[in-house]
Amino acid sequence: MMVTVLPFELPGKKESRQSGKDKIWAVVAMIGRKRKVASIHISRDAALADCQWRREQVTAYARFLAEARDPAPDYHITLIYKGELPKGWVPMPALGILHGRFI
């Protein structure tokens, strides 16, 4: 399965001109047009592995999600600045939508 790298912008935030050290790899969950940073990693390989695991979890629970009529998140990776993470951000479980954590 191929992983897609998407650009990521938080509403109202302009891209800052910070050094490359401030960039991290993020796994982004998407449902429709809503995006949320699900997890962050210092390496691209770690982000790819986490993204793949999350996609496998969604696939494993696809039938349950369909029966529950909950939309399944689609996971991608992207580079973001550390400062783009919302205050109080915490990692999201792979099936975080089941806990009402996808806003």
Image (spheres, grey):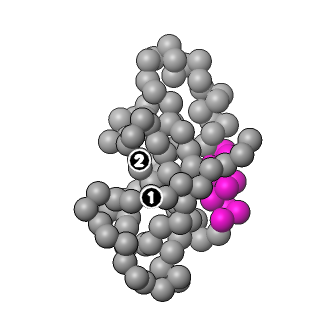
Q: Are marks 2 and 1 in contact (CB under 8 Å)?
A: yes
Q: Is residue 97 left or right of residue 74?
A: left
Q: Magenta stretch mostly in which secondary structure?
A: helix
How far from the left and from the top, in percent, is residue 81?
44, 72
Residue 80 seen anywhere in this rendered image of the structure: yes
How far from the left and from the top, in percent, is residue 83?
37, 73
Q: Dot 2, crowdedness within 10 Å: few (<14), some or many (≥20)?
A: some
> At 60% across and 26% down in the image, what residue appears?
61
Type of amino acid at the residue the image marks with label 2: Arg
Q: Is the residue 13 above or below the residue 62 in the image?
A: below
N-terminal label among 2 and 1: 1
Q: Is the residue 52 above or below the residue 31 in the image?
A: below
The label nearer to you, 2 versus 1, is 1
> Could you say which disc has been placed on residue 50 in the image?
none
Q: Which residue is mark 2?
A: 35
How far from the left and from the top, in percent, is residue 29?
49, 45
> At 44% across and 18% down in the image, what residue appears?
69
Q: Which residue is mark 1?
A: 8
Q: Is the residue 48 above or below the residue 29 in the image?
A: below
Residue 91 is a magenta residue: no
